Image (cartoon, helix red, strand yellow):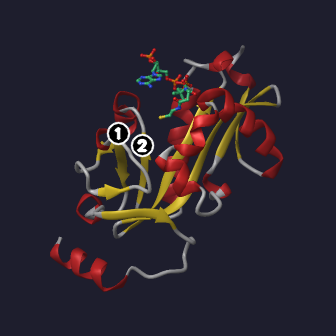
Amino acid sequence: MKKHDLVYLTEDASHDAAIEIINEEAFGPGRFTRAAARIREQGPHDRSLSFICTDNGETIASVRMTAVKAGCVRGHLLGPLAVRPSHKNKGIGRELVRIAVEAARRKSSEAVILVGDPPYYQPLGFEKVRYGALEFPGPVDPARVLVVPIAANVHTRLQGMIAWRDDGLESDGAICASREFAA
Ligand SMILES: CC(C)(COP(=O)(O)OP(=O)(O)OC[C@H]1O[C@@H](n2cnc3c(N)ncnc32)[C@H](O)[C@@H]1OP(=O)(O)O)[C@@H](O)C(=O)NCCC(=O)NCCS
C-alpha cells in the first residue's frame, strides 16, 4: 500500500454500511453494551466531526464524534475509532484522532473526551480525567477516561454525568455557572 492512496474524508450516510463492518470486526457484538455506546444510543453522532479513511476508494477506518455534556463541559465524545486489521500500524488511527480533535477545536467544542488506552491516546494530547469525576451510564474503568481540554477550566468543570446533548440548544444552568465562578 502506498501512503498516497489514503484519503481522509468527512463521514456521510454513504459510509454507514462500511463503518458498521469495520466496527463489528474491531469490537464484536459486545460493543453495544459498553458505557460509551450507551451515550451514543441517546442520540445521533455529529457527522461534521466524524471522519473516515479510504484506500483506493475503499473505507478502511473510521472515527466518530458525538456531542456530549460532561458535568459542565459542552464537548464531544470520541469513538468508536477503528482501523481494519489490513491497515493497522500505518499511522491511520493517530491521523483520524488528530483530524477529529482539530475539527472539534474549530467548532468551539470545549473538550474531546473518550474511554480508551492511555498509552495510545496520551501522546495525542489526551490527559487523564480526575478519578471518578465523570459518571457514565454503565461501568467504566476510571483510569481510561481521558480528555483533550480545549476551553478554560475543563478539568474543574468535568464533574458529574456525561450524556448526549443536542448540539447548541440547552444552557448550562446555575450549578455550572457557580462551578465556573469557583474555578
Ligand atoms: C487502536 C487502533 C485504532 C490503532 O489504529 P492504527 O492505525 O493501527 O494505529 P497507529 O498506526 O496510529 O498507531 C500505531 C501505534 O499504536 C500502538 N497501539 C495500537 N493500539 C494500542 C493500544 N491499545 N494501546 C497502546 N498502544 C497501541 C501500536 O503498537 C503502534 O505503536 P508504534 O508506533 O510504537 O509501533 C487499531 O488498532 C484498532 O482499530 N484496534 C481495534 C479497535 C480499538 O481498540 N479501538 C480503540 C478503542 S480505545
Q: Nearer the viewer, residue 101 or 133?
A: 133
Residue 6 sits above or below residue 182 on the image? above
Find out if the beta carbon at label 1 lies less than 8 Å from the nearest ligand 1 atom.
yes
In the rendered structure, which amino acid carries the disc numbered 1? Arg
Q: Secondary structure at mark 1?
A: helix
Whether residue 172 appears in this view of the structure is: yes
Please report the residue visible at 79 percent of the width from the left and 43 percent of the height from the top: 15
Q: Secondary structure at mark 2?
A: strand
Give the farthest residue toward the bottom.
174
In the rendered structure, which amino acid carries the disc numbered 2? Val
Find out if the beta carbon at label 2 lies less than 8 Å from the nearest ligand 1 atom.
yes
- Report which residue position mark 2 lands on: 115
Q: Position of residue 41 (x, y in %)?
A: 60, 57
**Image position of 154 (left or right of 1):** left
State the separation of the CA atoms marked 2 and 1.
Answer: 5 Å
Q: Nearer the viewer, residue 107 or 58?
A: 58
Q: Position of residue 57 (x, y in %)?
A: 83, 31
**Image position of 150 (left or right of 5):** left
